[in-house]
Image: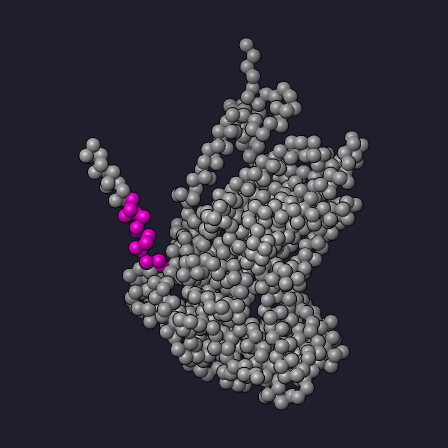
Amino acid sequence: MKRRGMWMGLLVFSLVCLLAIPCLAQRGVTKDTIKLGLILVKTGPVAALGLPNGNGMVDYLQYLNDQGGVAGRKIEVIWEDDSFEAPKSVAALKKLISRDNVLTVITTGGSQQTMANLENINQYKLPNIPNALMKEFYDPFQPYIFAMGATYEAQYETIVDYIFNDLKEKNPRIGVVYEKKEYGIKSMEAVRKRAKAYGVDLVSELVLPTGAVDASSQVLGFMNDKVDYVVTCLLLPPTITFVKTAEKYNYWPKHIFGFNWATDDMLVKACGGAAKNYIGVNFVGAWGDDSPGIKLAREIAQKYNRTDISLTSLYINGVGVSWLFGEAFKRAGKDLTPDSLKAALETLREYSTGGVFPPVTYTSKSHAPGEMVKFFKADVANKRLVAITDWRKPKEMK
Amino acid sequence: MVIRSKTFRESYYEDIKLFQTVWIRVWIFLFLILLATLPLWGNPYVIYLINLSCIAVVAALGLNLLIGYTGQISLAHAAFIAIGAYTTAILSSKVGLPFWACLFASGGVAAAIGFGLGIPCLRLKGLYLAMATMSFGVVLENVLITWDKLTGGVRGINVAKISLFGYPLDSDSKIYYFLLVITVLVILGIKNLVRTRVGRAFIAIRDRDIAAEVMGVNITAYKVMAFTISSFVAGIAGGMYGYTMGYIHPEHFTLLLSIQYLAMIIVGGLGTILGSIFGAVFIILVPELIKGIARFSELLIPALKGKYNEEWNIAAFGLLIMIFLIFEAGGLHGIWGRIKTSFKNWPYTY
């Protein structure tokens, strides 16, 4: 009887030990490795956006490894493709956590994907910097979502400010062409609201889908309404379509404006002279900048044989995200857990990435972006974008 | 002495029995025990995939009832799933109704709209019917985006968590049982439906509608009924999807999803219950299997390391579907039937 009790006790003790092992093990971190997840589109219609972005992230982390790693640890990255579909993104996150046991997922991709994963991000404590630029991700405060760059609202407010303050227009005829997606509608509403604040109504609001191969009806509509400032709330492919169609109809508004997902050297390469009036905003530096951060991004691309980066702004963006995580790993030191990683990111104050991003500040109460952007103009002769302003924020309106 | 074959049937009622042999009951019982204990030993990711499979099985059953049993092609299935998902989202998060009411309402709203769509589509067949139903899907997507006060528009909408007698089903392993029970109920419901007069009328319409009419089948009523029941089941699947994902967006329910469901019932086997189950599980799990094989190959052949790309998976998946269409028109259900027959007749070939 006594012996039986002893065996039972031993069995219970063993079971408790077995159950305790996963609790004691640090998720995704060993003495010499840090395992990270990355969820970004690699296949499908928007693969062209995800690939350079993810390559930038992976290359910078590899660069850190080649420099000896962080606090003696090498970084492993597992990149899961979500095909830009929220259900696949959720499945990928579950796989990365339950099978691959990663420390965190450094990005969960776009707004929809991040929104679908929000509950899991909070449940598993996954500090991440998504490509989600909607205000809703930062206000109200989300404990594990860290802003990458200026929200759509801020980008378009800055554009309208530019028309009224830098170009000194009193009564501009502004037309907006947008896509019926979250970024398009949010952006169009921001332009409308900001213009109204300056006492001007939009002359025209037209829709152009991403897959469009022709923008004749939109261009002719703007010509008919005598629009002299076109604000595009479109991704890069439809922006190219619009700019080329405008050239075809010999429509030359004073300027065509665009936001970060369209402000890339590729626009000038694809449109040539048609892009001469294009001015875009972005929260990452341009590929041709002389800033130390951008120089490093170019060196990294060369080191890892990225000779054919299609969208350089997205590559820089990826480098920037990994840069911030790399710095947080250093600050967290040996005791690296999801909580210490979050705390380390929250110690960044006016942190400089050498011109890759504007200075970054996160606190324990706010992970919102600094809302700063630069303006870039097309340099048609050299087929690239050049900065025409320094970092700036939307103007405070009374 | 007369030795009766175990598949020997003397009446129509024996022929349509739910479980033909005792062994089928035993296997199903064992399979259900396996499924019931899965959360105790299964990986959470596997459970999540099974949750998705349950939703796909329910939706595929609804579509198979319309296409496989009644012969009415539809490309609006994703739209009905969307109607169900949005009804659940709105009623659970904005009105605060309990899950069972939301789920019934999801099926009910989808069925009502399916009934409405079924009437104008009565005169259409084949490609024309496919085009009409596809257009409905496009219109619905626009409604979901534009009616943002109700649907959340392009921002999407959150779905409240299920609570069962005050106990929240807030993890995959908890919601798993809920999905499993509904899936079993829907399978039994559809299986019973196709054994009744209604089911036989559906099949008669599919095989030859004029002949069916001559035999006294009210084609108008049964076609609309097929649309309504199929939409009801799709609405239930939408509700299940909403609860599982916790967040829905108009882009989750595109034409591509309708085509994916079409692929499920073709690969599984048109006009069979088991085919819908096989097809749904196949389409959900095979990409994972291919990925696993690719990773295993990398371990065996170091030269392949880092070469795997998601596009391989898509290509392999497409190839598998092509192989099915060319070499096994009966789908997975056809293969299953042949395996069963060869076991039954062993050691004889025929």
Q: Answer left or right for B194 relative to A149.
A: right
Q: Quadrant of the N terminus of chain A?
A: top left
Magenta stretch prevailing secondary structure: helix
> Does the image show residue A168?
yes
Identified at 73% across, 71% down, the residue is A217
Above-or-below relation of B221 to B297: above
Identified at 50% across, 49% down, the residue is B163
User: Which of the two residues, B28 or B307, is positioned nearer the viewer here?
Assistant: B28
Q: Quadrant of the C terminus of chain A?
A: bottom right
Q: Magenta stretch?
A: A15-28
Identified at 63% across, 75% down, the residue is A232
| Membership of A51 in magenta stretch | no
- Write down the quadrant of residue A298 in the picture: bottom left
> Does the image show residue B207?
no
Above-or-below relation of B334 to A105: above
The location of residue A35, given as percent across then percent down, is 37, 60
The location of residue B199, given as percent across then percent down, is 68, 34
The location of residue B208, given as percent across then percent down, is 75, 36
Q: Residue furthest left?
A: A2
- Write down the quadrant of residue B203 in the picture: top right
Identified at 43% across, 56% down, the residue is A96
User: Which of the two residues, A397 or B129, is positioned nearer the viewer here?
Assistant: A397
User: Which of the two residues, A390 or B295, is positioned nearer the viewer here?
Assistant: A390
The location of residue A50, given as percent across then percent down, is 52, 65
